[in-house]
Image: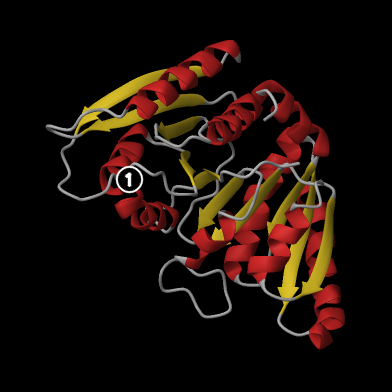
């Protein structure tokens, strides 16, 4: 694995952000939110649509190109478009794996989303396949001019540096403050890997001049997972984003998937910054 600083530099030199579009009202919200990243990072947006049938590609190309032109004019950014035929679960990962993108900004319609749209729980099936940071925006998310406050729940993943990379990327762009957040379960021993990842977080934030606070709370919400209390804290902190690994850790695999789905589809409209255990080669 490359050193974290080298990975960050590689990401930022790519200068493209992928924005999957399904032509719903949420897509306009996602494009608007992605425009902030385009302006701040001086990066191009690429609007991307997966047509269900090859025969639909040409007609959709005109529609998506028009949307890209409108976004370019409205936000004074460089915005292009691309249409392919196939499933979002194969074509979006294939596009990201081209190595042109440093980030994906995508929307989720929530657990009651319509079929053929980016569904609530189905969004998790997609983002685990993406080797770059992904910002997931909910239909209830208000527009954010900046991402000043990020909650980072510390976790036990062996590939934890991937989410640290994503958080540092966001914090560098917006001058964010990061809350390194953990929940203490009564009578439970803190896993050694969690302690290691906590110290790694602090070390890298200090090396990269990222403002941070370490927050440890006793468990106050009676639930199997951590999502409910994490969301409660993020609301109290006025968080602009919550960071999470999109894959489950070995330590908490028995409830992690449900926790992640609850975060991704949260009704509070707090965007979720995600990283997988994949590397962007």
Coloring basis for residues:
secondary structure
Expressed as whole percent of the image width and height from the top left, the position of residue 34 reads 67, 48
Horizontal side, residue 117 vs residue 12: left or right: left
- Which residue is located at x 62 percent, y 49 percent? 33
Horizontal side, residue 255 vs residue 25: left or right: left
**The quarter of the displayed image where residue 80 is located:** bottom right
Expressed as whole percent of the image width and height from the top left, the position of residue 76 reads 81, 46
- Dot 1, how many residues are within 10 Å of its Cα: few (below 14), some (14-19), or many (20+)? some
Horizontal side, residue 63 vs residue 110: left or right: right
Tell which of 168 and 68 is nearer to you: 168
Tell which of 143 and 41 is nearer to you: 41
Q: Which residue is mark 1?
A: 252
For mark 1, give the secondary structure.
Answer: loop
Query: Where 189 sits versus 38, above or below?
Result: above
- Which residue is located at x 12 percent, y 32 percent? 187
- Which residue is located at x 60 percent, y 31 percent? 165
Query: Where 259 sits versus 151, above or below?
Result: below
Expressed as whole percent of the image width and height from the top left, the position of residue 239 reads 42, 36
Query: Where 79 sits versus 50, above or below?
Result: above
Residue with the most extreme bottom position: 55
Tell which of 39 and 241 is nearer to you: 241
Tell which of 163 and 247 is nearer to you: 247
Task: Report the quarter where the N terminus lies.
Answer: top right
Expressed as whole percent of the image width and height from the top left, the position of residue 31 reads 67, 56
Horizontal side, residue 236 vs residue 241: left or right: left
- Which residue is located at x 72 percent, y 72 percent? 50
């Amino acid at each position: 694995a490359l050193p974290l600083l080298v990975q960050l530099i590689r990401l930022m030199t790519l200068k493209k952000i992928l924005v999957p579009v399904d032509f719903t009202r949420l897509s306009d919200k996602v494009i608007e939110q992605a425009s902030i990243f385009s302006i701040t990072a001086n990066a191009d947006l690429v609007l991307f649509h997966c047509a269900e049938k090859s025969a639909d590609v040409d007609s959709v190309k005109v529609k998506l190109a028009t949307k890209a032109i409108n976004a370019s004019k409205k936000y004074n950014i460089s915005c292009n478009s691309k249409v392919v035929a196939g499933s979002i679960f194969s074509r979006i990962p294939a596009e990201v794996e081209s190595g042109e993108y440093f980030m994906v900004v995508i929307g989720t319609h929530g657990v009651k989303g319509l079929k053929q749209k980016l569904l609530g729980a189905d969004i998790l099936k997609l983002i685990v396949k993406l080797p770059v940071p992904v910002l997931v925006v909910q239909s209830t998310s208000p527009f954010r001019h900046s991402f000043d406050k990020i909650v980072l729940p510390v976790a036990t993943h062996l590939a934890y540096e991937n989410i640290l990379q994503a958080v540092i990327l966001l914090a560098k762009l917006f001058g964010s403050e990061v809350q390194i957040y953990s929940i203490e379960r009564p009578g439970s021993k803190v896993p050694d890997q969690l302690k290691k990842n906590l110290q790694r977080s602090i070390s890298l934030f200090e090396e990269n001049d990222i403002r941070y606070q370490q927050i440890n709370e006793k468990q106050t919400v009676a639930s199997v997972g951590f999502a409910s209390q994490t969301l409660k804290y993020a609301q109290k902190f006025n968080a602009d984003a919550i960071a999470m690994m999109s894959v489950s850790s070995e330590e908490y695999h028995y409830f992690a998937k449900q926790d992640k789905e609850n975060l991704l589809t949260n009704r509070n409209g707090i965007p979720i910054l995600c990283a997988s255990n994949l590397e962007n080669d």
